[in-house]
Image (cartoon, helix red, strand yellow):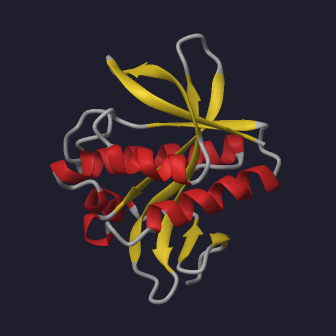
Amino acid sequence: MSDAIILETPRLVLTMWNKGDAELIRQLHSTIETTRYLSGAAPWTLEKAEERLKSWFGEHARDGVTKYKMLRRDDGRFIGRAGFSRFHQENGRGEFELGYSIRKDAWGNGYATEIADALAQWFFKRGLARQFIAFTHPENAASQRVLRKIGMQDHPPMVIDGISCPTFRMAR
């Protein structure tokens, strides 16, 4: 792996994206199963993947963090994305939001818990803020379990795209 490493865990590595990675992102979100809990709830086109990739470069330049490329440490295989973005609520207040998406063929291996826990520790070690949030689609019980498992506390739900989403908070 030639990319600069952002974060390593026993099984995973986060790196910054390369400009040609839009196809990886499109593949990650190419089915209804992998997008049903995301805004829009539809498979991503290459154009949408390119737009998101561009936004992640912009976030990283502006905030020093973004959603990073997630690879398996043993073989370098792309398995998803994970990191933090600024979530701007209607009141204009921006909070850091933890998020991750894992390729369907890598589900059930504990990768989401491993990377979410490592990112929480990394976030506070870097002193990015005193707290961060995460939210899920109300039907995404697996992700809710991950967030509770890493120690996030239930918080009043947020309405996103007209849906009342379970929301979690972690403070230093």
Within the image, what quadrant is residue 153 found in?
top right
Q: Nearer the viewer, residue 21 or 165?
A: 165
**Residue lying at the far bottom of the rendered structure:** 74
**Residue lying at the far top of the rendered structure:** 91
Q: Relative to 79, does residue 121 appear above or below in the rendering?
A: above
Q: Nearer the viewer, residue 26 or 71?
A: 71
Residue at 38 percent across and 72 percent down: it is: 109
Q: Is residue 49 visible?
A: yes
Q: Nearer the viewer, residue 119 or 62?
A: 119
Q: Relative to 110, does residue 72 appear above or below in the rendering?
A: below
Q: Quadrant of the N terminus?
A: bottom right
Taking the image as shown, residue 74 lies to the left or right of residue 9, namely left
Residue 19: horizontal and vertical position, in percent? 47, 62
Residue at 27 percent across and 54 percent down: it is: 29
Residue 154: horizontal and vertical position, in percent? 54, 32
Q: How many marks?
A: 0
Q: Is residue 17 visible?
A: no
Residue at 26 percent across and 64 percent down: it is: 104
Taking the image as shown, residue 79 lies to the left or right of residue 82, namely left
Q: Quadrant of the C terminus?
A: top right
Residue at 32 percent across and 71 percent down: it is: 106
Taking the image as shown, residue 23 lies to the left or right of residue 119, namely left
Within the image, what quadrant is residue 77 found in?
bottom left
**Residue lying at the far left of the rendered structure:** 32
Residue 79: horizontal and vertical position, in percent? 39, 70
Residue 149: horizontal and vertical position, in percent? 53, 53
Q: Relative to 42, does residue 71 appear above or below in the rendering?
A: below
